[in-house]
Amino acid sequence: MAVKEDVGMLIKMNVKCFKDIKKLDEGLTIDESQIFELTQFVNNRYDCADFRLISLIKTYLAYKDLLSSKAVEAIEDAMLNFKYWMDEPGSDGMCFWSENHQLLFHTCEYFAGDLFPEQTFSNDGHIGLYHHLKAKPKILDWLENRFKYGFTEWHSNTYYEEDIAPLCVLVDHAKDIEIVNKAKIILDIIFLDFAMHSFNGYFVASSGRCYEEQKKNPEKADVNDILAHAFGIQKREYDYERISALFILCKNYQVPKIIIDIAKNTDKQVIKDSMGLNLSEITHEFKDNDINKKGMFLWSMEAFTNTRSINMTMNIYNAWNLKENNFLKDLESVNISILRKPGLLPLVVKLLNPATQGVAIERANTYTYKTSNYMLSTAQKYHPKKFGDQQHIWQATLDENISIFSTHPGSPMFDDAARNFSPSFWVGNGINPHAVQHENKVFLMYDLTPRKGYLERKRQELVHFYFPIERFDEVIEKDSIILAKKRQNYIAIIASKKHKKMENSEIIYEGKKSQFIVILGSEIEDVSFEKFSDYILSMKTTFSSQKITMKSDHLYELNMLGDFKIDGNRINTEYSRYETPYVNAKRKPEELLISYKNKKLYLNFYQMIREEK
């Protein structure tokens, strides 16, 4: 099979299921051309083929009797001829390794192998039982890592959809009770994340992977059908061409009532959690240099070319012969035996300082402040002055789904369709800010002077805010302060300099270094926009390239790459797994007790206990 060209994001991310799956669920026969389109995509092994294959497998498991023999045969052929993992032979254009893809591929292989235990799979020549037994421990490892560490793709309003779909198929159709029970627990954790980090029924938190359209408009988030079905806060016509359909049609999982109640709670609240691992933690957490455990956790982080990951990356690259993979082909430039054998590759990475280091999604300590009027969410001190990629560092959300956030616009490191969408003008950051939040205030320090990296394009010397000016009822500019009002909700941007331009929903600040304080308010807290404005204008703020100081109700101090202090007290910005009104748990918990009002949910992953009271 020839190497497949990447078909681009618009095609890869469009139709992942088919609209008439709902009719099948109602016991009706359908126009099967939709199924044949999906099988063709899978057979071509384009990137995101696994999204389509999980939908086909669900269709086969749940609705086979309603299909024609031709459709049944097409799905069977797709399953029997597919490439299920990187260690198999055969060319493809697929990304296997990110957190969501790993579960999708393993789940597809688990079911295909179980359905055809004695038949030979054409791609690698093994029988189905081999594939089934190979996939099971990988699924269990994936589930355990999510319970232990949280999600690498933290709070992603795109990729949680891709996690939920295979989990629902496992819950509905897996024969292994351990997988079923543990999959339900991980679904509970995802929906708890949704509930705690959503506003007015939309999932709008700081995120490990988030794209432009979803950042600017919460109504465009990929998980919206899931949230609407789970919580009933927003009402929607479901799009069954999304793989969220597999949750909507799921029979054996119900979102716990306590989590639904948490999602509907509009009281003022602070949510702190810790998700994922830093690269510095990997060696301690994964003692053995095992490709399938340590290696795949690193690759679930998309940590390929970092000093702590490059040796493992090249081990995998050569062991599985990945030089023809669209995403990894450029690794051949450092695939030099004289560098690999003495262990010189980490030194090479350190010297080259490749911009691709920022692709790695490391541990996030997220702080979310919610009121009935607005929500503010930040990844605290997320690797400031380092290269970024798709990480969404902070976001404010007001009523009517008005989003405000800032980025240092980056440029993609590659030109090919597979890799040319991040970082970009509004996605991720070229260089990450030093960002911290306390309640309704976020403090931002941008320093765009770090050493230029290999593969980095021309670095833009500006920071910009997404700020939909036309949607506010009133906007006031006072020197370097911008104040805005939407109904009873207020926002202020206090900057270290005057903006260069403010138009078309964008505020641009030029220069290599800039600092900002963003403060939210409301009629409930501040009585009037006039009083809020007076409060902001009365503050004493001092900005320098190394420090922000603000004196208002408290004295706030933020030092670049240093401490955040309130009234002289150092504020800890590294959190336990959960520090919330509903659940508190240390990192790497064995159990979770979620409590709200008169309800409780107890989750013990290792003993497979899931009890609602």
Image: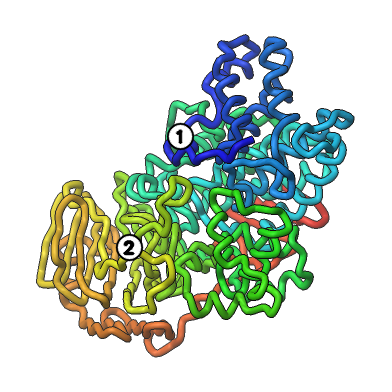
Q: Could you tell whether 350 is left or right of 343 in the image?
A: left
Residue 167: x and y in percent read 67, 41
Relative to 41, say whether 546 is above or below.
Answer: below
> Which mark is on residue 407?
2
Residue tagged 1? 11
Q: Which residue is at 72% across, 30% downward? A: 79
Q: Could you tell me if residue 586 is visible in this image?
A: no
Q: Residue furthest bottom?
A: 568
Check disc 1: other Cα within 10 Å, few if <14, some if 14-19, many if 20+.
few
Q: Residues within 10 Å of mark 2 (few under 14, many from 20)?
A: many
Q: Secondary structure at mark 2?
A: strand
The numbered mark, 2 or 1, whose residue comes first in the sequence reads 1
> Type of residue at label 2?
Thr
Residue 277 is at least partly visible in this image: yes
Q: Amino acid at mark 1?
A: Ile
**What separation in Å lies between label 2 and label 1 (alpha carbons)?**
27 Å
Residue 9 picture quarter = top left
Front residue of this view, candidates 319 and 295? 319
The reply, left or right, for residue 226 in relation to residue 96 is left
Residue 31 picture location, percent across and down: 56, 11
Describe residue 177's horizontal placement relative to residue 416 as left or right: right
Q: Is residue 612 above or below residue 74?
A: below
> Percent from the top left, x then y, of residue 400?
30, 44
Q: Which mark is residue 432?
A: none
- Picture coordinates of residue 443 (x, y %)? 33, 73
Coloring scheme used: rainbow
